[in-house]
Amino acid sequence: MDDHNELLRMESISKSFPGVLALDSVSLDVRKGEILGLIGENGAGKSTLMKILSGVYAMDSGQLYLEGQPIHILNPHHAQQLGISIIYQEFNLMPNLTVMENVYVGHEPGPPGLVSRRQLYQRTQQLLDRLGVNLSPTATVRDLAVAEQQMAEIAKALSMEVKVLVMDEPTSALSDTEVQSLFNIMRDLRRTGISVIFISHRMDEIKTICDRVTVLRDGKNVGTLAAAEASEEAIIRLMVGRSLNEFFHKEESSHPTSETDRGTGSGEDIALEVRGLTRRGSKRDPSAIVLDDISFQLKRGELLGLAGLVGAGRTELVRAVFGADPCDAGEIYVDGKQVDIGSPLDAIHVGMGLVPEDRKEQGLILHLAVRENMSLPSLNQLTHFGFVDRGEEVRRVREYVARLQIRTPSLEQKVNNLSGGNQQKVVISKWLMLKPKILIMDEPTRGIDVGAKAEIYALMDQLTREGISVIMISSELPELLAMSDRIVCMAEGRVSGVVDRRDATPELVMRYLTAQRRQTTQKAA
């Protein structure tokens, strides 16, 4: 490497927490005007390393160098003063303030003690113009879309004359179009000499946007590769020590697939049937049809994939089935009997569980312990004469911690301190403790590393072999094709096709996902 082109070097960084060696003598270098991918399983040490770089954690040993000079970062503000900024997955913005107030918070332009609103507006507009973003400096942050909030975060970093910008899973909530816009901005930053450390679990993104990729495993740097030349197989082997074709665990379903997905619901092997589910109106457009006459069946012991592009209505469908959102029409049958599901509690009573898309907002209480999160839905079963049987609670939680191989120092560890993959296992475990007949999993592997993905794939396969019926929403086509017995394809709030595992190809599924709504006209009689 050309030392004259080196902007940042982290040398022999170690960090321990009680009972855990998070970083073991990790070294990493970033070149000026480079996009460096940082990848590894959840718990590999990525976040800890970046929190040391951004001043959140103090390292136990090691040395940092910026532009060849040793530095000692005291706190996050000091890191920003040095030109090091980090954009977390959960944005650090104040929702009730404007974009310009967020961008320049703490270093507002103007004379001492006063803020020049005119300069605040002008400087923010210049930054947004530099980014090529059509966003008003006076817009309130709470009213912005996710992609717009991300642009505000980048503008905030640029206002501090950033040299190194860390982006932690920046594409996880973006559409494909928004991802491409972000990548264009990253390329522009690179051209101006700004270095970007890009953390992602998506291999295609790493290879598309990064110059090099550094891989962490078990708190160690296990290799740095040129991204363009590194195969996905090579990167994954470094991450987890096994090959790509070992990820998916799937046995063929023993249930025959009928020619049509619309049935009577009277068959003994039908666990769930939805008929004519319809929902009108959304926050943005009260007249819109969100779900349009949706019908499908789920067999016992089947893994039914639910596919669709952004806005197709997949999450809206499962929320409606689970009683989280109301419906205007439709019928739901469980085990051949019509059920009235007006709330999630009703769904639980008929044997359903829902692993939501956003585990942190909808699936977990982050400040509570692993034990408390896992046992929460089961408290009625654990309570006798008004008191929780703590011994039985601990016994059940330990059983599922062992079964799902949840890596936690203790049952009393706050779930917020676990890696993403282990958080997801806690969410799954709390539903399995209820022994559901039907488990709905919305993006169950989003934002977790490939090792944790393999474990969840194996778990889903095991559940279906035990007779539990699983509905899986996924935005990853290879995942759907590998794991599903059948795939229900959605487009514009309707079912556009149902594909059997034996017939499924990427081309066929995408044809259904991009199907346009048939235009019909009805003349008055």
Image (tube, rainbow, N blue to C red):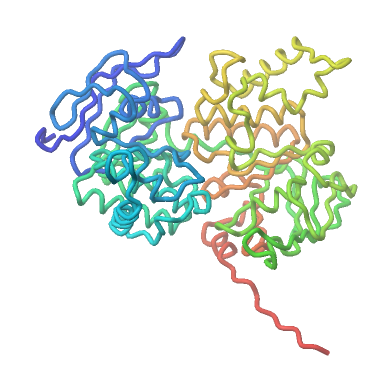
Q: Is residue 198 left or right of residue 267?
A: left
Identified at 72% across, 64% down, the residue is: 292
Identified at 23% across, 32% down, the residue is: 82
Of residues 504 and 9, which is closer to you in this image? 9
Identified at 34% across, 46% down, the residue is: 115
Of residues 79 and 121, which is closer to you in this image? 121
- Numbered-mark total: 0
Residue 522 lies in quadrant: bottom right
Query: Most extreme residue toward the bottom, as rendered?
Result: 525
Q: Is residue 412 left or right of residue 348?
A: left
Identified at 55% across, 57% down, the residue is: 310
The answer, for residue 99, to whether it is visible in the render is yes
Residue 281 lies in quadrant: bottom right
Of residues 156 and 432, which is closer to you in this image? 156
Q: In which quadrant of the rendered image does the N terminus lie?
A: top left
Tell me where residue 216 appears, x and y as whole percent.
35, 28
The answer, for residue 234, to whether it is visible in the render is no
